[in-house]
Image (cartoon, grey):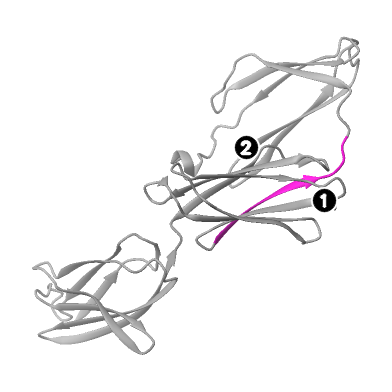
């Protein structure tokens, strides 16, 4: 008797566990009808039956059952019995979090005394519907690893949560880690806290069009003027373009100099494709 168990070893919590069992005669390769299929969950030396069925005339049995959301790993025992034999198989599957959480801040760099505004959006896979009313914990660690903030909230009807954190006037400078924890899954983002001086000039960017498609040619002008009214003549210009994949990645660097009027003209050909974001289903 030949038994084929078709399926995967990782599933999303809260979604059905699906397998397909195929039973054939080893000598003739013909399908075996009415072979009994039993699947059990093994826990602490005991077995709990999850599924019981038989193969159809094609020798196939479609398996569909659910597991509790609090299980991270499950040991499954397969038992297949027919008129010509018996076969058993053990496997371990993982149940992964069904939540997809986006963590954002209002800007990437802060000065002492400023307020960090933090927001999350949590969606439940695979339908990408809002995670409503679930506990979500915010944590913030400073550059030395000290936990300076922790708060428990519940996501609203739209799956969002929001907090704000006021930096003290005297703080450790460096990278601060902002963390959101939902159903045991951690999502992190890093922001910088340091003193910085506001620019003494204004930069105005204008492109030929408001949006471009992949592969198109983009042209534009940069106007750099001091706040007291004079142009930043012959100032060095560096334009860095980024594309978004798993995170923001540097794509190209454009360098040059302003003219005597503080103007700089640039042109750039965009990449032929961009990766879509999971939130928009690519």
Residue 34 occupies which quadrant of the picture?
A: bottom left
* Range drawn in magenta: 185-196
Residue 48 occupies which quadrant of the picture?
A: bottom left
Q: Position of residue 74 (x, y in %)?
A: 39, 75
Q: Nearer the viewer, residue 30 or 225?
A: 225
Judging by the rendered image, the residue that carries numbered circle 1 is 174
Say if 10 sits above or below 115 in the image: below
**Residue found at x 54% / y 25%:** 213
Which label lies toward us, 2 or 1?
Answer: 1
Say if 201 sits above or below 251 in the image: above
Q: Nearer the viewer, residue 149 or 199?
A: 149
- Distance, label 2 to label 1, CA atoms, is 25 Å
Q: Is residue 8 left or right of residue 258?
A: left
Report if residue 193 lies within the magenta region: yes
Judging by the rendered image, the residue that carries numbered circle 2 is 243
Say if 87 sits above or below 162 in the image: below
Residue 67 occupies which quadrant of the picture?
A: bottom left
Q: Residues within 10 Å of mark 2 (few under 14, many from 20)?
A: some
Q: Say whether disc 2 or disc 1 marks the residue closer to the N-terminus.
A: 1
């Amino acid at each position: 008797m030949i038994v084929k168990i078709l399926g995967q070893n990782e599933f999303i919590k809260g979604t059905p566990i699906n397998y397909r069992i195929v039973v054939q005669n080893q000598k003739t390769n013909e399908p075996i009808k009415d072979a009994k299929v039993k699947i059990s969950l093994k826990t602490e030396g005991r077995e709990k039956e999850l599924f019981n069925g038989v193969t159809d005339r094609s020798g196939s049995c479609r398996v569909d059952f659910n597991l509790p959301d609090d299980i991270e790993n499950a040991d499954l025992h397969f038992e297949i019995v027919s008129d010509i034999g018996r076969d058993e198989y053990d496997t371990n599957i993982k149940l992964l979090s069904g939540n997809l959480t986006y963590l954002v801040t209002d800007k990437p760099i802060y000065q002492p005394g400023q307020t960090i505004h933090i927001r999350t959006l949590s969606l439940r896979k695979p339908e990408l519907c809002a995670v409503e009313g679930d506990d979500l914990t915010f944590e913030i660690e400073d550059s030395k690893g000290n936990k300076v903030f922790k708060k428990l909230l519940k996501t609203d009807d739209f799956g969002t949560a929001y907090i704000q954190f006021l930096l003290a006037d005297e703080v450790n400078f460096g990278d601060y880690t902002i963390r959101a924890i939902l159903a045991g899954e951690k999502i992190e983002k890093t922001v910088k806290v340091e003193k910085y001086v506001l620019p003494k000039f204004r930069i105005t960017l204008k492109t030929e069009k408001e949006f471009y498609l992949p592969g198109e040619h983009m042209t534009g002008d940069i106007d750099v003027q001091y706040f007291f009214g004079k142009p930043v003549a012959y100032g060095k210009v560096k334009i860095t373009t980024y594309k978004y994949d798993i995170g923001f990645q540097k794509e190209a660097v454009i360098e040059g100099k302003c003219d005597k009027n503080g103007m700089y003209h640039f042109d750039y050909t965009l990449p032929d494709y961009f990766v879509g974001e999971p939130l928009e289903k690519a």
